[in-house]
Amino acid sequence: YQRRVRGPLKEAFKKIKYHRISGVAVLNSDNKLVGNISASDIKYIGIEASLFTKMELPLSKILPFTPQISVKPTDTIEKVWKLFNEKRVHRVYVEEQRELVGVISPIDLINLVDRYC
């Protein structure tokens, strides 16, 4: 289940709540993946007790974006599984020619095992 956000911080948390998901991809103005924000990030953002003053700020002013873990649509499930294990991430993004086309979460892997094993 894929959701994207470009606006202020409050829009990211609204999408997380509304869609009952754990995180959203953060895209720049060129529609390129630049980061990720998850429900657990709220504890770090509000650490200075100034959380509500930050809600209108663009995500780029708040979060230190690090390169996101991504794969190509042609990569194997084994590669994705290995990335989850080695990188200790909760989602792996799927990009094709630097365009975000999907996201894989651990629950997707559980569903795959349930379906085929």
Image (cartoon, grey):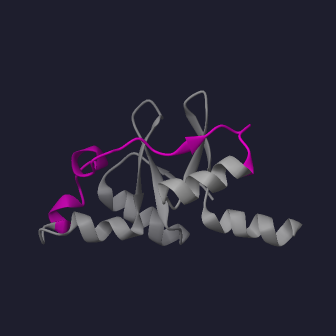
Picture coordinates of residue 101, whole percent (x, y):
63, 41
Please determine whether, in this image, residue 15 is positioned above or below residue 59.
Answer: below
Picture coordinates of residue 13, whole percent (x, y):
38, 65
Picture coordinates of residue 102, whole percent (x, y):
63, 47
Residue 76: quadrant of the picture: top right
Residue at x 69%, y 63% (from the top left corner)? 108
Residue at x 19%, y 68% (from the top left corner)? 52
Q: Nearer the viewer, residue 29 or 99?
A: 99
On whether residue 54 falls in the magenta region, the answer is yes
In the image, which residues are magenta? 51-77
| Quarter of the image that includes the N terminus | bottom right
Left or right? Give the position of 100 relative to 42.
right
Residue at x 59%, y 54% (from the top left corner)? 2
Please identify the residue farthest to the top as the structure is shown: 97
Please determine whether, in this image, residue 65 is positioned above or below residue 44.
Answer: above
On whether residue 53 falls in the magenta region, the answer is yes
Residue at x 49%, y 54% (from the top left corner)? 87
Q: Nearer the viewer, residue 109 or 53?
A: 109
Number of labelled discs? 0
